[in-house]
């Protein structure tokens, strides 16, 4: 029932989004009760509605279309969402497996579902290694498809694979789609200080990928993802010391690049909502309240679980709290008051 309520509320947001694309500014943020968490876009929504009713055909058709059109970004996103839905409502997916056991699209969702379940288990490394044959079967479904290799990268991170093994998988992913955002995010996570790299490696990788990408590419959001990992991760230990600190200028440049990318997307757009939610988190951590308020205008009613589920078991509630605080600080600054600035960040202002 929650899904149907979300879709009904999603339909009511179409008019404001269209107005934004026509150049008219929204009069203000939507009320709390109108904000949606992880709302599907117009293509995914019908597939989820049919799945909730027990039918798998619409989901299969959508994934098959992404494969036929080599629309790897959408294929990756749809795979993640269908696997998440199958985790909570498994009946429709069990019917799909029984009806089409060799369907390459079903095999991809099956591998993603097994990967998600392995990540949530206390025996994570062991279970993730067991997912290997499922990922291989998905990769054999279409040799052009980079999404199974993104799954393999995620599996390698959770299985404590070596840098050499990870690099071999990374080469396979790049060979299929050199600008695939999902694969780059998987590599960024592997190189982060929270896993097997450092803040410096993470930022270097993100900035190189963004520089090589064309205008409007999702890869230009990677430096903001690196900034998020730095600003919200644990503080450097005494061994790392000052060498692991990221200069404020580098953080601001990452945010500026994200702002530039966000401006190329339509306002109130569920497809790009996660990138804007990440950017919002970075901007608030940097104390850039006016920029944060502008991203809130562009986000409209579309909150996403990531990154807010990193801080709370209620990501929607956390988003609403951040929204309220950011808008309050932005209004305070516009009225001549002094904002708190970046005093709460790790580096502070120069």
Image (cartoon, rainbow, N blue to C red):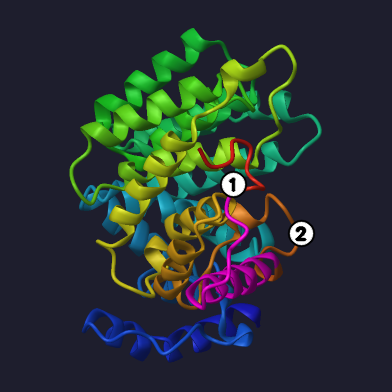
- The residue located at (33%, 19%) in the rendering is 171
Residue 210 x %, y %: 29, 36
Predominant secondary structure in magenta? helix
* 73 displayed left or right of 330: left
Q: Which residues are magenta?
A: 318-342
* 237 displayed left or right of 106: right
Relative height, residue 242 to residue 336 (above, below): above
| Residue 148 seen | no
Circle 2 residue: 313
* 121 displayed left or right of 21: right
Alpha carbon of mark 1 to alpha carbon of mark 2: how far?
A: 21 Å
Q: Is residue 123 magenta?
A: no
Q: Is residue 324 magenta?
A: yes
Relative height, residue 331 to residue 57 (above, below): below
Task: Check the picture and name the quadrant holding the N terminus.
Answer: bottom right
Name the residue furthest right: 122
Quarter of the image for residue 205 reads top left
Characterize the local packing of mark 1: few (<14), some (14-19) or many (20 or more) Cα atoms within 10 angstroms: many
Circle 1 residue: 113
Q: Earlier in the sequence, mark 1 or mark 2?
A: 1
Q: Of residues 17 and 126, which is closer to you in this image?
A: 17
The label nearer to you, 1 versus 2, is 2
């Amino acid at each position: 029932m929650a899904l149907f309520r979300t879709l009904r509320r999603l339909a009511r947001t179409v008019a404001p989004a269209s107005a934004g694309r026509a150049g008219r500014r929204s009069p203000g943020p939507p009320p709390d009760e109108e904000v949606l968490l992880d709302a599907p876009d117009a293509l995914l929504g019908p597939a989820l509605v049919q799945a909730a009713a027990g039918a798998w055909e619409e989901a299969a058709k959508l994934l098959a279309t992404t494969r036929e059109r080599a629309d790897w970004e959408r294929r990756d996103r749809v795979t993640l969402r269908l696997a998440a839905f199958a985790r909570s409502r498994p009946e429709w997916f069990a019917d799909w497996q029984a009806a089409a056991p060799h369907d390459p699209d079903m095999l991809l969702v099956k591998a993603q579902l097994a990967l998600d379940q392995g990540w949530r288990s206390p025996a994570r490394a062991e279970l993730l290694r067991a997912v290997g044959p499922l990922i291989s079967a998905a990769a054999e479904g279409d040799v052009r498809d980079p999404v199974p290799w993104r799954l393999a990268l995620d599996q390698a991170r959770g299985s404590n694979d070596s840098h050499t093994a990870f690099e071999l998988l990374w080469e396979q992913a790049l060979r299929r789609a050199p600008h695939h955002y999902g694969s780059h995010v998987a590599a960024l996570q592997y190189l982060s200080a929270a896993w097997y790299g450092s803040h410096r490696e993470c930022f270097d990788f993100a900035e190189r990928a963004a520089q090589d990408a064309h205008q409007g590419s999702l890869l230009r959001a990677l430096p903001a993802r690196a900034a998020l990992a730095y600003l919200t991760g644990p503080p450097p230990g005494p061994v790392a010391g000052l060498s692991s600190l990221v200069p404020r200028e580098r953080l601001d440049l990452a945010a500026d690049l994200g702002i530039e990318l966000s401006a190329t997307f339509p306002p109130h757009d569920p497809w790009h909502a996660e990138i804007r939610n990440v950017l919002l988190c970075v901007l608030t951590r940097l104390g850039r309240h006016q920029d944060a308020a502008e991203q809130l205008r562009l986000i409209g009613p579309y909150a996403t679980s990531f990154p807010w589920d990193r801080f709370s078991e209620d990501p929607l509630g956390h988003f609403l709290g951040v929204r309220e605080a950011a808008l309050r600080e932005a209004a305070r600054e516009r009225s001549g008051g002094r904002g708190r600035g970046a005093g709460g960040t790790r580096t502070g202002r120069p």
